[in-house]
């Protein structure tokens, strides 16, 4: 069963608009961490934001925020005031405490339009 | 700030040859992970090490082996290369138990001809 689901294969957003990238996850482990990574066309995997399952507040990092809804098992990434440089593939990922590895969703390709 | 260093950045090999990929973690990071990302795919976990011991194993072919050395750098050795091994190979490092500090290197693009 898919543990990380990203339902938007691709998105087109106008520059300066806010964008929400969806991510739902499936786990029975009460302790886990959620990640978002950005992968531009150059290929590197850039860490954006992290949310722990016991964190009381939603994580924020500059223009990135994570809308964490634990009961719904949802961890959407919100990018405020999008920029052309935000065009990239975005991966949601999870690490369960009982495992060592992190597992990735299939990704969402975001296109920012001028 | 220092990041995860991977070398080489690009590698071209022939079928049945061997390849060695290297990963230098962020200073004071004790855990290393290897991932394989095929074209248009999400990264797939291969193997991880904590304090020089293998800590988890994923879908790593028997033709591949890896180890972590005393200075915490890691090497992924790939033998009898096949066309299907062409992929972007990532290394990530973290401090054990500190998920928020999990960072990836820029990857090694391996092309098998």
Image (tube, rainbow, N blue to C red):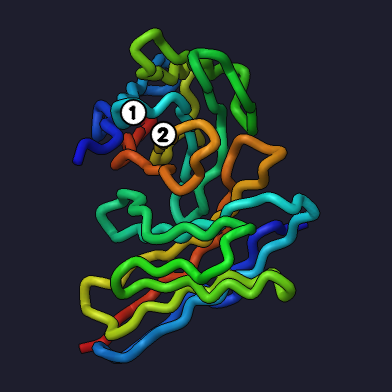
- Badge 2: chain ID: B
> Looking at the figure, which quarter contains the C terminus of chain A?
bottom left
| Residue drawn at 25 percent across, 88 percent down | A15
Given residues A53 and A76, the one toward you in this image is A53
In the rendered structure, find residue B25 and report the number of the disc placed on it.
1
Answer few, some or many: residues within 10 Å of disc 1's Cα (few below 14, many 20 plus, some between 14 and 19). Answer: many
Residue B38, given in percent of the width and then of the height, sits at: 47, 46
In the rendered structure, find residue B93 and report the number of the disc placed on it.
2
Is residue B79 in view? no
> Looking at the figure, which quarter contains the N terminus of chain A?
bottom right
| Residue drawn at 57 percent across, 61 percent down | A55
Tell me if A5 is positioned left or right of B7 in this view: right
Look at the numbered disc 1 and give the secondary structure of its residue.
loop
Residue B19, given in percent of the width and then of the height, sits at: 37, 18
Given residues A40 and A80, the one toward you in this image is A80
Residue B108, given in percent of the width and then of the height, sits at: 32, 35
Marks 1 and 2 sit apart, C-alpha to C-alpha, by 5 Å
**Total numbered labels:** 2
- Badge 1: chain ID: B
| Residue drawn at 64 percent across, 32 percent down | B58
């Amino acid at each position: 069963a898919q543990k990380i689901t990203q339902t938007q294969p691709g998105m087109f957003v106008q520059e300066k608009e806010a964008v929400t990238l969806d991510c739902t996850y499936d786990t029975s482990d009460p302790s886990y961490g959620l990640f978002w990574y950005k992968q531009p066309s150059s290929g590197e995997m850039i860490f954006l934001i992290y949310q722990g399952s016991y964190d009381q507040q939603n994580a924020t990092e500059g223009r990135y925020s994570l809308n964490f809804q634990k009961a719904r098992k949802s961890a959407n990434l919100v990018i405020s005031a999008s920029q052309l440089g935000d065009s990239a593939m975005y991966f949601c990922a999870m690490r369960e405490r009982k495992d060592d590895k992190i597992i990735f969703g299939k990704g969402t390709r975001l296109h920012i339009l001028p | 700030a220092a990041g995860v260093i991977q070398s080489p950045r690009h590698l071209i090999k022939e079928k049945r040859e061997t390849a060695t990929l290297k990963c230098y973690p962020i200073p004071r990071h004790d855990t290393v992970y290897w991932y394989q990302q095929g074209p248009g795919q999400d990264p797939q976990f291969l193997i991880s090490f904590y304090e020089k011991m293998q800590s988890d194993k994923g879908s790593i072919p028997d033709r591949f082996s890896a180890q972590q050395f005393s200075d915490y750098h890691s090497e992924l050795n790939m033998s009898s290369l096949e066309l299907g091994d062409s992929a972007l190979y990532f290394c990530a490092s973290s401090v054990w138990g500190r998920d928020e500090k999990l960072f990836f290197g820029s990857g090694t693009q391996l092309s098998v001809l």
